[in-house]
Image (tube, rainbow, N blue to C red):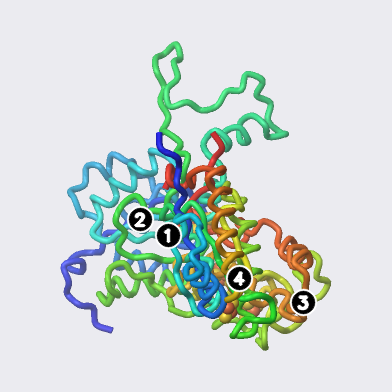
């Protein structure tokens, strides 16, 4: 396809990558595009990419506004430093892409919203069995040492997604996004055929639509965790009693976990027509659980069945707690 | 300080519970004005998302009421609603909310008295719990 002569295209495209509260998997996902990375660097200069090239924050600060054409930003926002970088990169970029579940929905780090800074620090620095910290020292934003004062960025009580911090132009969902999705997005940018601003660059289907397993009428009488199942049958996992987030999750990954006989854990985030992944999953799961003989079931039996679902919050919002309707736990004062 | 008046949202099924609430009204039974009712075709129509949204927007309590077992006009909406509410409650506990804020009850068209008593009881219970704590943090 001939490349359009947009302002972005006159010279080599200028791109950047950044990581905030992330695991590094999204960085690896970029490298997972394999030799296509050569196509990328053939048409684009990478100006800033802390994991791979030696550039400093001040290099970004010195750029004129909107100097970067596209910035791919992965990771959630949980510290002052990440927030500052989100503001800075927003200012310096024409297009800001939230890259991966953490940036898009808060991701796994977002599960920390069942706690606050104090609880996280207590576990990480004090109560952890392998930690020896008699003086209970935890990071402080300011500490005096004999050479002067040292500072650290603030650690927030609540984890946020990127678009809860700055305006985001496009979203690439998944933990991490697949190589195909990344190339689709990259090509759409290069060929100047991006969808409307604010779009998720991904299909409107659910994971179930992409899943290879045969589906019949869904009804289950018992919940089973993966380790309790000796042999996975060649049919929908949910119908086998294994909680699979497929029906509540946006596709685009070609149901890759199901290809490995593992249930979908929901990394694609909510389906496009739903506001809340967990709410949708509660609705779907409760509709099919214990359907057989429901008229004869006592309330206690229903309770027992529901109790089989261990940690509904962690299961249904594994990747989306910060952007769900109720985005954090209420802490006791 | 004036007494805390809970704001309770009630999703009532058209065929039984809404008629039950109507009966309470036409029979001039007294019950607290804290409930704001929304008529739905069936309790099975109530998406957990509505309840999450109500709580987020500051409702102190949410009631879902439907036909008695065996009486749902769509056969099984009330069974589904019951299971959804139970599952939702276990999750609300993980979110640090009191599960008593959310209730599922069976109220038939002839149970005006049960409806009036239920609203009184639920209002008292939520008064004891105090305002929805999400109002302070979201
Ligand atoms: S989206 Fe997944 S792979 Fe990417 S940083 Fe977050 S946890 Fe890691
Ligand atoms: S629920 Fe899971 S296993 Fe079943 S069709 Fe959907 S994605 Fe496939
Ligand atoms: S199957 Fe589910 S968890 Fe696995 S990659 Fe796809 S969306 Fe993510
Ligand atoms: S019609 Fe009343 S609960 Fe279904």
Alpha carbons under labels 1 and 3: distance apart = 32 Å
Letter of the chain that mark 3 sits on in the rendering: A
Report if the CB atoms under discs 1 and 2 are less than 8 Å apart: yes
Q: Examine the rendering and report whether any part of residue A297 can be seen.
A: yes
Alpha carbons under labels 1 and 4: distance apart = 48 Å
**Residue drawn at the location 74% of the way across and 78% of the way down:** A294
Where does label 3 land, which residue? A232
Please tell me which residue lies in front, A182 or B22.
B22
Where does label 1 land, which residue? A104
Alpha carbons under labels 1 and 2: distance apart = 7 Å
Q: Are marks 2 and 3 on the same chain?
A: yes
Q: Residues within 10 Å of mark 2 (few under 14, many from 20)?
A: many
Where does label 2 land, which residue? A163
Letter of the chain that mark 2 sits on in the rendering: A
Letter of the chain that mark 4 sits on in the rendering: B
Report if the CB atoms under discs 2 and 4 are less than 8 Å apart: no
- Percent position of residue B104, x then y: 61, 64
Could you tell which of marks 2 and 3 lies nearer the N-terminus? 2
**Residue drawn at the location 34% of the way across and 44% of the way down:** A85
Q: Nearer the viewer, mark 3 or mark 4?
A: 4
Report if the CB atoms under discs 1 and 3 are less than 8 Å apart: no
Alpha carbons under labels 2 and 3: distance apart = 39 Å
Letter of the chain that mark 1 sits on in the rendering: A
Q: Which type of secondary structure does the marked residue at label 3 adopt?
A: loop
Q: Quadrant of residue B116?
A: bottom right
Dot label at residue B111:
4
Q: Residues within 10 Å of mark 4 (few under 14, many from 20)?
A: some
Q: Are marks 1 and 3 on the same chain?
A: yes
Report if the CB atoms under discs 2 and 3 are less than 8 Å apart: no
Q: Which type of secondary structure does the marked residue at label 1 adopt?
A: helix
């Amino acid at each position: 396809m001939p490349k359009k002569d947009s302002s972005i295209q006159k010279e080599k495209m200028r791109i950047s990558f950044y990581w905030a509260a992330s695991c590094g998997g999204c960085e690896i996902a970029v490298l997972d595009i394999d030799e296509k990375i050569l196509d990328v660097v053939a048409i684009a200069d990478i100006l800033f990419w802390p994991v791979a090239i030696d550039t400093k924050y001040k290099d970004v600060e010195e750029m004129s506004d909107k100097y970067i054409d596209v910035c791919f930003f992965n990771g959630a926002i949980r510290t002052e430093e990440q927030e500052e970088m989100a503001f800075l990169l927003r200012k310096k970029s024409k297009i800001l892409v939230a890259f991966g579940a953490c940036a898009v929905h808060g991701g796994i780090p977002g599960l920390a919203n069942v706690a606050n800074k104090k609880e996280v620090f207590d576990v990480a620095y004090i109560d952890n069995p392998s930690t020896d910290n008699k003086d209970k020292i935890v990071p402080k934003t300011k500490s005096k040492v004999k050479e002067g004062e040292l500072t650290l960025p603030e650690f927030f009580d609540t984890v946020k997604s990127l678009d809860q911090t700055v305006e985001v132009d496009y979203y690439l969902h998944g933990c991490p996004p697949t190589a195909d999705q990344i190339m689709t997005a990259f090509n759409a940018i290069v060929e100047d055929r991006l969808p409307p601003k604010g779009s998720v660059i991904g299909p409107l289907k659910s994971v179930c639509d992409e899943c290879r397993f045969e589906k019949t009428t869904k009804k289950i009488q018992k919940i089973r965790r993966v380790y309790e199942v000796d042999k996975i049958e060649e049919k929908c996992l949910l119908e086998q009693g294994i909680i699979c987030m497929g029906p509540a999750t946006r596709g685009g990954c070609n149901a890759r976990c199901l290809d490995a006989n593992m249930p979908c854990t929901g990394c694609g985030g909510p389906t496009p027509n739903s506001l809340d992944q967990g709410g949708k999953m509660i609705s779907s799961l409760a509709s099919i659980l214990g359907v057989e003989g429901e008229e004869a079931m006592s309330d206690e039996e229903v309770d027992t069945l529901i109790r089989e679902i261990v940690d509904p919050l962690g299961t249904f919002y594994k990747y989306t707690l910060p952007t769900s309707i109720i985005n954090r736990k209420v802490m006791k004062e | 300080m004036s007494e805390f008046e809970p704001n309770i949202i009630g999703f009532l099924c058209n065929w039984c519970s809404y008629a039950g609430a109507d009966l309470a009204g036409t029979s001039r039974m007294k019950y607290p004005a804290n409930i704001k009712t929304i008529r739905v075709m069936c309790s099975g129509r109530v998406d957990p998302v509505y309840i999450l949204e109500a709580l987020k927007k500051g409702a102190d309590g949410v009631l879902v009421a439907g036909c008695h077992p065996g009486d749902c006009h769509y056969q099984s909406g009330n069974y589904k609603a019951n299971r959804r509410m139970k599952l939702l409650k276990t999750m609300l506990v993980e979110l640090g909310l009191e599960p008593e804020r959310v209730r599922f009850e069976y109220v038939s068209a002839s149970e005006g008295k049960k409806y009036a008593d239920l609203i009184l009881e639920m209002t008292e219970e939520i008064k004891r719990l105090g305002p929805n704590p999400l109002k302070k943090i979201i």
